[in-house]
Amino acid sequence: QKEVEQDPGPLSVPEGAIVSLNCTYSNSAFQYFMWYRQYSRKGPELLMYTYSSGNKEDGRFTAQVDKSSKYISLFIRDSQPSDSATYLCAMSGNFNKFYFGSGTKLNVKP
Amino acid sequence: NAGVTQTPKFRVLKTGQSMTLLCAQDMNHEYMYWYRQDPGMGLRLIHYSVGEGTTAKGEVPDGYNVSRLKKQNFLLGLESAAPSQTSVYFCASKKLADLYNEQFFGPGTRLTVL
């Protein structure tokens, strides 16, 4: 069983839609949770960071962590064509090693 | 400030050949990482380093070696390339004490092993 599971999509939505991206994990020691955005043929870039359980909001993006269910989510409100990318969840139990999901490819249609 | 750079950007190898991928960062970061990215598999950690002169194995270390002789450089070596090592390789670096635990990634190296 992989440490982190993520639906690969692809996910196609119209502009303005609310997007929900999710990951599940098996290691209860994970306490740092991140979402990275990766445009085609580029390296990933950090989008959101959450420590332990709870919600975090940054503009149109909201990250949620439910440690009791081992489930994390990223919500994108008012999605834009520029949001079209692959979204990778990542998590860690310390500051050393990180475990990534397989990525969900999102396409926002104008 | 170039961030994280990777050399080369593309490479085609024949089975059994060797090569070294170079990662350089100019942010004075303590941590450096090598990942491979394959379709449907996400990013998988090959090796990482928490400081100059130290390295550790990640999830998929077999067939690879690394060295961190200088703080700014992290080398990934393939001694005898195999087709299973065809992948996109990403290097990343991270500051030791960072509020957001952020890794900064390079642009990637696309490697094909025939």
Image (cartoon, grey):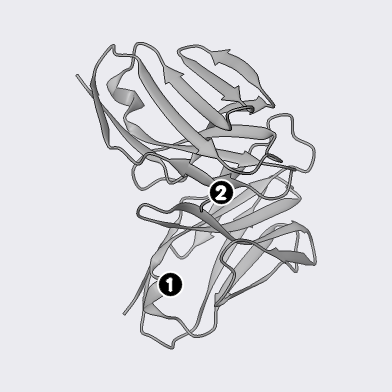
Please state the horizontal and vertical placement of residue B10, each as a whole percent of the image: 38, 65
Q: How many marks?
A: 2
Q: Indicate whether B95 appears above or below B11.
A: above
Q: Indicate whether B6 appears above or below A105.
A: below
Density class for disc 2 (Cα within 10 Å; few <14, some 14-19, many ≥20) is few
Residue at (80%, 67%) from the top-left corner? B53
Question: Label 2 belongs to which residue?
Answer: A3
Residue at (43%, 46%) from the top-left corner? A102
Question: Label 1 belongs to which residue?
Answer: B85
Residue at (35%, 41%) from the top-left corner? A8
Apparent side of residue B102 relative to residue B19 in the rendered image (left or right): right
The residue nearer to you, when weighing A1 against B91, is A1
Which quadrant of the view contains residue B33?
bottom right
Q: Indicate whether B30 appears above or below B48.
A: above
Density class for disc 1 (Cα within 10 Å; few <14, some 14-19, many ≥20) is some
Mark 1 residue element: helix
Q: Chain of mark 1?
A: B
- Inspect the image, locate mark 2, and give the three-letter code of the amino acid beneath it: Glu
Please state the horizontal and vertical placement of residue A60, each as a whole percent of the image: 45, 13
Q: Are marks 2 and 1 in contact (CB under 8 Å)?
A: no
Q: CA distance from mark 2 to mark 1?
A: 22 Å
Quadrant where the image shows the C terminus of chain A? top left
The residue nearer to you, when weighing A76 against B104, is A76
Q: Indicate whether A110 appears above or below A29.
A: above
Apparent side of residue B47 relative to residue A102 in the rendered image (left or right): right
